[in-house]
Amino acid sequence: MAKRNSLGIFNGLGGPWSRGLLVILVLLSVALLALDRSQPEQSRFDMARRAIADASKPAMTLLSAPLRTLNQFSGALASNWQAAKKVRALEQDNHNLMQWRDLALALHEKMSRYEELLGAPQAPTPIVITARAITDTGGPFVRARLVNVGSDDGVAEGQAVLAYNGLIGRVMNVGKRASRVLLLTDLNSRVPVYIVDAQAHAILAGDNSGAPRLIYIERGVEIEPGMRVMTSGEDGVLPRGLAVGQIAPAGGKDWRIALFARPERVDFVSILEVAPIVFEALDETENALPEAGEAEAVSDASPSLGAVPGAPSAGGQ
């Protein structure tokens, strides 16, 4: 069997020579590391690295210039691409909003003609009072805000308080220069609402959390997440049609509302100066029950059941 040939210059390094050389190299490496750790500021390796860095600085500067330019160009290209995508999305949204605007104008014109034909009274145009919301430091309500307007500015109890994108609460206490607003998220808040997509009524009840609950929902109504909710106006205090939020699942059979306006992030608010509906009291003189004597007299004077006024009685024949 032929023997395996060894590599040229390593022919004489077999046996103890190779092991001894390996030990020497290991010891030399350990010594160099120890020397480098003991005197890092005077290390020859450190000096060599500094010299190489100084020598390669002009070349690296020249090479980094086109790379930097390429990175800036790629970043600008990506930014323009994202901007173009946003512009296309905004154009599509604008197109959809224009269609909804045309539909809203057509429905408004039709509704105005129907009201004119039916002789329905026109709803009063609300007066908007702009106010600044101030954090409430205390009071009977947990979720409440103070606003810097009061009765001197036309604010009254029960008026709706809105942010730029939806209802946040209603006025509870009114002073001359400040008022307290009860938020929809407060435990004492109860607002009748209307589920637009399901055409159902319910009550929006706060529980001191960020998402109020829906209670007393009409039976047999199928509710799905994402349905819009607005005020129904059935309490005679808040006007109908104020945007509130969208339905969000809460687990089980409970449903919560993701409010369009976050009350804790509201700075400026709008108060709708709309007079609440006042139910006239019944006239006591017209609807008072007759007394006992008057009731007997009326029963004696009234003809018997089935008798015809003016006909002769049986005893007169």
Image (cartoon, rainbow, N blue to C red):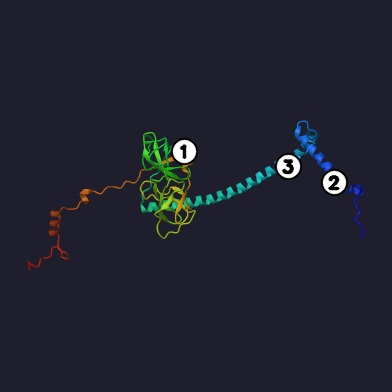
Q: Quadrant of residue 183?
A: top left
97 relative to 240 in the view: left or right: right
Q: Tags 2 and 3 in contact by the CB under 8 Å rule?
A: no
Amino acid type, residue under disc 2 in the picture: Arg
Instruction: Compare residues 244 and 242 and report the one nearer the observer.
Output: 244
**Quarter placement of the N terminus:** bottom right
Q: Position of residue 108 (x, y in %)?
A: 44, 51
- Residue that badge 1 annotates: 268
Q: Nearer the viewer, mark 2 or mark 1?
A: 2
- Residue that badge 3 annotates: 70
Kindly state the secondary structure of the residue where label 3 is placed: helix
Q: Earlier in the sequence, mark 2 or mark 1?
A: 2
Q: Position of residue 66 (x, y in %)?
A: 76, 40
Instruction: Compare residues 106 and 85 and report the one nearer the observer.
Output: 85
Q: Residue at x 59, y 49 (%)?
A: 89
Q: Nearer the viewer, mark 2 or mark 3?
A: 2
- Within 10 Å of disc 2 (Cα), the crowding (few <14, some 14-19, many 20+) is few
Q: CA distance from mark 3 to mark 1?
A: 46 Å
**Quarter placement of the C terminus:** bottom left
Amino acid type, residue under disc 3 in the picture: Leu
Q: Position of residue 212 (x, y in %)?
A: 44, 48
Picture disc at residue 291: none
Kindly state the secondary structure of the residue where label 2 is placed: helix
108 relative to 6 in the view: left or right: left
